Amino acid sequence: MSGKKKFKLLDVILSVICVVFVAEAIAPAAAIGNQQFFWWIFLIITFLLPYGLIASELGTAYADDEGGLYDWVRRAFGDKWGARVSWYYWINFPLWIASLAALFPSTLGAMAGIELGLVPSLAIELAFIWIIIFISFSRASDAIWIMNVAAVLKVAIALCLGGLGIYFAATSGFASDMAPATFMPSFDMNALAYLSIILFNFLGFEVVATYASDMENPRVQIPKAIIIGGIVIAAIYMAGSFGIGAAIPATELSLDSGIMDAVAIMTGDGSLPLIIVGVVFLLTLFGNMVSWSFGVNFVVVCAAKDRNMPTAFSTETRKSNMPKGVTIANGIIASIVVLLLPVAEAFGIGDFFWVLFSVGVVFLLFSYIPMFPAFLKLRRIDPNRNRLFRVPGSRAVLSVLAWLPVVILVLAAFITIVPLDGSESELAKLPMLITVIAFIILGEVVRIVAGKKRPQAYLGMGKSGEPPARSLPGAEVEEERSQREEHLARN
């Protein structure tokens, strides 16, 4: 193992950008209008800063926890909440893959100036899904180049949008009203419903903690990467949103093709810049899913080994010891979802991308809520832990830093999926609300059934001490079976 590749600091920073910066979320964020800039700044201060600090402390204090977010919550509150976090964290991922798969054909159509039919669209969507699944079997350290290239391309898209927006505004004027009053928050339900997207754009720092075993010095690299990456990400998000807002009024912005629409308006249909941006954008979708797959899949494998997820999810590939069962499950679920797209359209759910994307975002928000009280509890019950990075402040300051993000997460999730009045736009949230409730119930069933195979529940460090060493039930079965097959083949 001495020749194993290791992440350098630049690799880790680029990984942060690749994981956290989501190019396809620029358009939904820009749909808020000019007030988005107020919310960016507000949420950077009230959410991103506390979240980055807390993730840095947990990621370095518990650098050996490969399950990242799941392990931290389990250490604090035991198997019950660990299982819930792992379910919420995981179920968002195949839904996210499906939403991006649905985005792929429309982007290709915008580049070519045509509308693809149902069969070609489904073929493209399924190909996208299974290419992601195939790449996910590689080790994170072996896929550094994919994440690094994707990070650079994402920054290039945002800067390109920002540059085009400045040029377009200077030569043709802004498409949107740029009066100072438009930059102030309106607190209307239409705008607040998109705040979860800005929060979503900040999530993913803890994924980098799951790469700890592939880093040269995780306790130093993780905090530096989160701080530097967070600053860069906030800047490029606002640059991209500015470019879209310069070309398209927020009321006319398409949530799934906003980037392509903006570039087409600024450079012309079928133009070379439009094609280049389209190709780069599609490439970033692959990088996005690959980088997240490493973090999400390892979380699920760890939970499965603890009997908090189905044991079939704990199987690993023989050559690279990468998650196998959960990776295949991701592909199957995402494939089923995109094949249901025509059915969804038949029932009037036209914006399938937004429904899937929103449901995935809500579950991701759910999974982070327990992390902040877990931070406070671990500070209390595990005071002697070697914390090379500590969030500064008194107990009162730490309480504010931990609970403020929780309030924001809960409100954002609630506003996103719960109809707050009888208007058509609010009632359109019902499919999302029903889907979320169904998956929550299914998750409780999975948690209870998986837990029956556990000899003894882990109740957290306060009651059960250090978590027991993980067994590899599914992986061991897979390995033993492979060894038997090799033995039979030799004999």
Image (cartoon, rainbow, N blue to C red):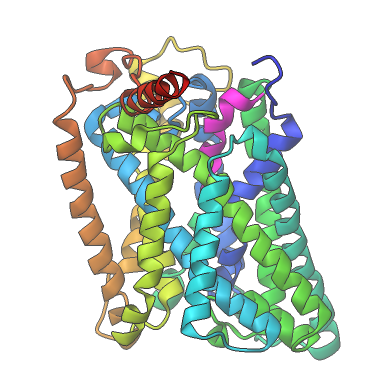
Q: Is residue 205 magenta?
A: yes
In the displayed structure, does residue 40 sit left or right of residue 111?
Answer: left
Residue 180 in view (yes/no): no
| Residue drawn where x is 49% and y is 20% of the image | 64
Residue 256 versus residue 484: which sits nearer the camera? 484
Q: Is residue 155 magenta?
A: no
| Residue drawn where x is 76% and y is 76% of the image | 275
Residue span colored magenta: 203-215
Q: Residue 193 is drawn in which quadrant?
A: bottom left
- Residue 239 location in percent, x, y? 72, 65
Residue 91 versus residue 30: which sits nearer the camera? 91
Q: Is residue 45 above or below residue 434?
A: above
Residue 237 in view (yes/no): yes
Q: Main secondary structure of the magenta part?
A: helix
- Residue 462 location in percent, x, y? 26, 17
Location of the C terminus by quadrant is: top left
| Residue drawn where x is 43% and y is 45% of the image | 327
- Residue 488 location in percent, x, y? 40, 22
Location of the N terminus by quadrant is: top right
- Residue 437 location in percent, x, y? 22, 60
In the displayed structure, does residue 485 sit left or right of residue 3?
Answer: left
Q: How many marks?
A: 0
In the displayed structure, does residue 223 sit left or right of residue 457?
Answer: right
Q: Residue furthest front?
A: 491
| Residue drawn where x is 67% and y is 27% of the image | 221
Q: Residue 410 is drawn in which quadrant?
A: bottom left
